[in-house]
Image (cartoon, rainbow, N blue to C red):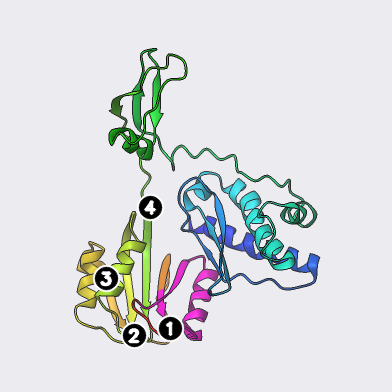
Amino acid sequence: MVDLVRQATDKVRESLCIAERHFSKSFTLDDVLFDLGGKAAGQLVYSRKRASYKIRINRSLLQKDPNHVINQTIPHEVSHLVAFQVYGLKIAPHGREWQSVMRDVFGLRPDRCHSIDTSSVSPRPFVYTCTCPKLFRLSKRMHTKLATKRRTYKCKQCLGPLVYSHEEKLHVESRVMEHLLVVSKGQPFSAEHAKMLRDLVKGFSVGRVSVRYEGVRGKGIRSLISALKLDESVVSAEMIGESLPGAVSHAVFFACPGDERSLLAAKKLRERSAVVRVLRHPGYEG
């Protein structure tokens, strides 16, 4: 998976370079994240508050169909960024400006949607029947609506109501963080940091964790071990030094605005194909 992340990240850089040569101007992209879930293969996120652009990639679909995500989805999302920065934010997301970038800059057909099979990432395990008899497979959301009687579904053929039969067991692919680096600079690492990390790594199996900090408040490290349900033997914690540990697959930097050192370290890890998040400290004001 690390090689695919590297290839995808390189494709983003390559696509931006192509667009910059075409328009003779530079484009701003603040981050590339591999945290998108659901059926979407990619997403461009613009924050008006911070005037920042991020591209989010679906790791599951990248692994399922790397050729499509790298060669179609990434130029698709970069085209959104380019169109907005050239023509302004008021244009239609898939309007003629975006279509022009796709065709003229990247030589691609401006398709709005991908064709990747998403059944494994958006499953329908709840089986219903009607009087035909016929089988219907519903998602968890649809099943919940039926179970709570907020919605009724009928078979279009016999017009009979759908009746719950059973739930099929699904094979869920495990997601792994082989080596997670956590850096807290500017504020001591605390239980609040551990809670944020718990939400970030939800659904992942964490191999080992390296924590680098300028200080610890209360039971910060103990809270981390408890929140991530880790064995003490896989967690190392020490003061921030001049160098970071090697072979990092994922990293989270807690930093204050203007912390250039953390931003530079995050950039270097991304160049090594690590998946990196840079976040403000919990409860930060200033």
The alpha-carbon separation of the residues under discs 2 and 1 comes to: 8 Å
Q: From where the camera sits, is residue 248 visible?
A: no
- Residue 9's x, y, as percent? 58, 62
- The amino acid type, in three-letter code, at marker 1 is Cys
Mark with earlier residue (1, 4): 4
Mark with earlier residue (2, 3): 2
Q: Which residue is mark 1?
A: 256
- Closer mark to the observer between disc 1 and disc 4: 1
- The amino acid type, in three-letter code, at marker 2 is Gln
The alpha-carbon separation of the residues under discs 4 and 3 comes to: 19 Å
The alpha-carbon separation of the residues under discs 2 and 3 comes to: 20 Å
Mark with earlier residue (4, 3): 4
Q: Which residue is mark 4?
A: 175
- The amino acid type, in three-letter code, at marker 3 is Val
Q: Quadrant of residue 284?
A: bottom left
- Residue 41's x, y, as percent? 54, 49
Q: Which residues are magenta?
A: 253-281
Q: Which residue is mark 3?
A: 235
Instruction: Tell me the quadrant of the picture where the C terminus can be found.
Output: bottom left
Q: Which residue is mark 2?
A: 187
- Closer mark to the observer between disc 3 and disc 1: 1
